[in-house]
Image: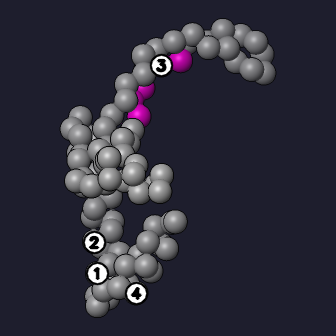
Amino acid sequence: MTKKELIEEILTNEDISKTQCEDIVNTIFEKIGNELASGKEVSIAGFGKFGISERSSREGVNPSTGEKITIKASKSAKFKPAKQLKESLNK
């Protein structure tokens, strides 16, 4: 499901304008992103928890030249589903 499809699905069930729905969905994603960017976790009961995964720097190989390179440390978003979501996926 894409963001556009999510908005369309919400519109079929709620009596709000498309603009209002887009604003709400964009605000939710923005708030989750901002919390993660500030180093915090976002926990949504019954759905799951968004957090940050930190990767340390490491050695790698450039596949086209075979040259050894250093891959910089980075952060990435991670998601851990809630028990209810896991159970619903495995029915």
Residue 36 covered by magenta stretch:
no
Q: Residue at x 57, y 10 (%)?
A: 59
Which mark is nearer the camera, 3 or 4?
4
The three-letter code of the residue at mark 3 reads: Lys
Q: Is 56 placed above or below 91 here?
A: above
Which mark is nearer the camera, 2 or 3?
2
Sequence-wise, the earlier of marks 3 and 4 is: 4
Q: Name the residue under label 1.
A: 20
Sequence-wise, the earlier of marks 2 and 3 is: 2
The three-letter code of the residue at mark 1 reads: Gln
Mark 2 packing: few (<14 Cα in 10 Å), some, or many (20+)? few
Which mark is nearer the camera, 1 or 4?
4
Q: Name the residue under label 2.
A: 24
Separation of residues labelled 2 and 1 (CA atoms): 6 Å
Q: Name the residue under label 4.
A: 12
- Asked if the residues shown at circle 2 and circle 1 are in contact, with their CB atoms under 8 angstroms apart, the answer is yes
Please tell me which residue lies in front, 82 or 51: 82
Please tell me which residue lies in front, 3 or 67: 3
Q: Which residue is drawn at 67% across and 14% down?
A: 61
- Asked if the residues shown at circle 3 and circle 1 are in contact, with their CB atoms under 8 angstroms apart, the answer is no
Sequence-wise, the earlier of marks 1 and 4 is: 4
Res 72 label? 3
Separation of residues labelled 2 and 4 (CA atoms): 15 Å
Q: Where is residue 7 shown, x and y percent of the image? A: 41, 76
Q: Is 86 placed above or below 12 here?
A: above
Q: What stretch is highlighted in magenta?
A: 71-77
Q: Which residue is drawn at 40% across and 87% down?
A: 12
The three-letter code of the residue at mark 2 reads: Ile
